[in-house]
Image (cartoon, rainbow, N blue to C red):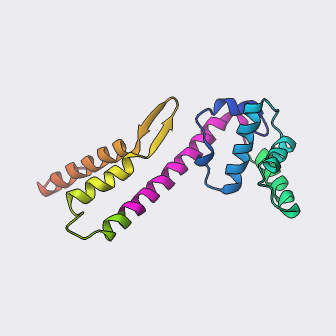
């Protein structure tokens, strides 16, 4: 979308390189941001030149791979006007990756400690703290995943209490 309409990059001030999952996509977006900050026009040629300048293009065969990828990215986005929506999808996937990694890290830490050092409520608190540091950028506001997770855990606790009291139609 951005290669087809370079002005669209201005609509994405909060989109970051690390929001992208794939290394090549990160490199392309970093090149675009560098060109944007220099005031250089964005197109396949300038982005590829910036990738080369960054030392990320690799050997000659890799350079043609970059050219193919840039061409695909230029034509793949069906509606350029929806670039903000597509960026939100990228961020959503980044948040999911961050949540998964935080949970893997928390489980690993809990498993590595002696049971009496981190169990029950302490384990739950530790896991919540790991999730609390993940941030979600929505427009100009930042919401923590920890806040969302805490609300969901409280909701689940209410459901469990309701079920134990015989109120089975709670969700």
Left/right of residue 23 with respect to residue 154 in the rendered view? right
- Considering the whole magenta stretch, tell me its main secondary structure: helix
Q: Is residue 24 above or below residue 132?
A: below
In magenta, the rendered stretch is: 78-106
> What is the x, y in percent for residue 130?
37, 52
Which one is in front, 44 or 81? 44
Residue 1 visible in the shown view = no
At horizontal 68% and vertical 29% (from top left) the residue drawn is 10
At horizontal 87% and vertical 43% (from top left) the residue drawn is 45
At horizontal 51% and vertical 29% (from top left) the residue drawn is 140
Magenta stretch contains residue 46 = no
At horizontal 80% and vertical 36% (from top left) the residue drawn is 42
Q: Is residue 129 above or below residue 32?
A: below
Q: Across the whole image, how many numbered discs are drawn on residues?
A: 0
Look at the image and tell me in which quarter the N terminus lies: top right
Residue 133 visible in the shown view = yes
Furthest-left residue in this view: 165
Left/right of residue 60 with respect to residue 18 in the rendered view? right
> What is the x, y in percent for residue 90?
59, 46
Magenta stretch contains residue 104 = yes
> What is the x, y in percent for residue 159?
22, 51
> What is the x, y in percent for residue 118?
24, 63
Left/right of residue 25 with respect to residue 101 in the rendered view? right
Left/right of residue 142 with respect to residue 109 in the rendered view? right
Displayed quadrant of residue 23? bottom right
């Amino acid at each position: 979308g951005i290669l087809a309409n370079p002005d669209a990059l201005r609509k994405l001030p909060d989109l970051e390189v690390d929001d992208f999952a794939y290394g090549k996509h990160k490199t392309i977006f970093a090149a675009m941001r560098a060109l944007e900050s220099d005031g250089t026009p964005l197109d396949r040629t300038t982005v590829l030149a910036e990738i080369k300048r960054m030392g990320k293009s690799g050997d000659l065969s890799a350079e043609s791979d970059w050219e193919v990828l840039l061409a695909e990215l230029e034509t793949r986005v069906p509606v350029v006007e929806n670039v903000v929506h597509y960026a939100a999808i990228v961020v959503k996937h980044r948040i999911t990756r961050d949540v998964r990694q935080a949970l893997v890290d928390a489980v690993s830490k809990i498993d590595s400690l002696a049971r009496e050092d981190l169990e029950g409520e302490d384990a739950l608190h530790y896991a919540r703290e790991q999730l609390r540091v993940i941030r979600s950028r929505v427009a100009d506001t930042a919401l923590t995943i920890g806040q969302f997770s805490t609300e969901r855990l409280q909701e689940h606790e209410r459901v469990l209490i309701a079920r134990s009291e015989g109120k089975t139609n709670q969700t």
